[in-house]
Structures are given as C-alpha cells and as structure tokens.
Image (cartoon, rainbow, N blue to C red):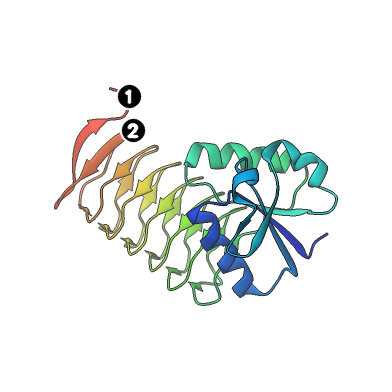
Amino acid sequence: MADALLIIGAGGHGKVVADTAMEMGRWSRIGFVDDRGEQLKQVAGISVIGRLADLESLRDEWSVAVVAIGDARHRIDLLSSLRALKFELPAIVHPRAAVSRWATLGAGTVVFAQSAVNAGASIGAGCIVNTGATVDHDCRLGDGVHICPGANLAGNVTVGARSWVGIGSAVRQGISIGQDVTLGAGSVVVRDVPDESIAYGVPARVRSRTND
C-alpha cells in the first residue's frame, strides 16, 4: 500500500529517518524491518514487523521502503534488492530542510532537518544529508554519500560514491573528493582528495589509504 512506509534498519539512524517521515505526514503507517526484531520489538513507538529475509513477503502490504543503515555499501546493496522487489524508493525530506526546485535527489536519499540542498545540486541514490548540513549549488554526490551533521560543501564540489564527509567539515568550492573516502570530523578541505583515502585536519591531508 502506498500509504505504508517500511524502514529498513531500526538503529539510531533509523529513528531519525522515521521521525523525518512522520513529520512529512505522507504515510499513515510506518514499520521497521531489522534482524534484531526479536530483541527490539518496538523503536520510538514503531513496531519492528520483520527481518530482512521477510522483505519479499512484506512487499504487497508495504510497497514503499527506505534503507536506514549507516554502512554505505550495505545501504546501496539493500536499495538494489528493494528495487528488484519492485518497492517504491522515495527520497525522504524533512519539511524543515530547504531543497531547491532545481536540485535532484536520488532514490532512497534522506535529507534531515535544518539542512540545505541548493540549485543545480545532484544527489545520488541512498545518500544522507544529515542535520544542518549544506550542499551548495551544482555539487555532484555519488550514490551512498553521507554528509554528516553540520558539514558544508561549497559550490561545484564533487563527492564520489560511498564517501563520508565528517561532522562539521568544510569543503572549498570546486573540490573533487573521490570514492570511498573518509573525511575526519572538523576537516577543512582545500585540495582534491583521491579515491579510498582517509583524510583529516586543518587543512585536511591524506593520512592513509583504505586499501593499504
């Protein structure tokens, strides 16, 4: 049913996604799916109605879903599974977020309260624009990117798939951040960051490579 939303993952991130969905007022029923269902039962007053293995059987009653799991690769894999099962995968946008009419949001992306996505920005599938984060004009974010709370991207920034921009970070205009990058909290990024890097500091420097 289109008025029923299934949230995959009942952890802390799942609670924020659920709260955001409730604030939207679009769905009359919301339920969680989580493999810890027998332990959790309910989260924030919302029932855990099944496990990941139950998704196919839940499809007829719960036709709309969003993945609320922090690990980017797992999140994207689950989105692919939901797409194959013909779930509708909307973007979830808090009513107190500002998203430009000229921005695009991919399937299953979530945009939380007090955040902004400006004109010409393109956000991939399964991204997280977290509380108070800003994505300025003409930025390009690949699938599974997480812009953590209070992080700010200036205009024309590119962030590759599955990268993590740490809480309170600032990224200068025109910077390119590669795929599978982790930027530490409070970093100031003034140079491009290559794929599979861990970078942090003021200014941010590459400290190691995740494939080393």
The residue under the point 59% across, 63% down is 18
The residue under the point 47% across, 61% down is 121
Q: Label 1: few (<14), some or many (≥20) within 10 Å?
A: few
Residue where numbered disc 1 is placed: 211
Above or below residue 206? Residue 47 is below
| Amino acid tagged 1 | Asn
Q: Quadrant of the C terminus?
A: top left
Q: Quadrant of the N terminus?
A: bottom right
For residue 178, side relative to residue 36 (left or right):
left
Q: Residue furthest right?
A: 60
Q: Position of residue 136 (x, y in %)?
A: 38, 65
Q: Give the structural element (helix, strand or loop) at label 1.
A: loop
Q: Label 2: few (<14), some or many (≥20) within 10 Å?
A: many
Q: Position of residue 67 (x, y in %)?
A: 60, 49
| Amino acid tagged 2 | Glu
Q: CA distance from mark 2 to mark 1?
A: 7 Å
Residue where numbered disc 2 is placed: 196
Above or below residue 53? Residue 111 is below
Q: Cβ–Cβ below 8 Å for labels 2 and 1? A: yes
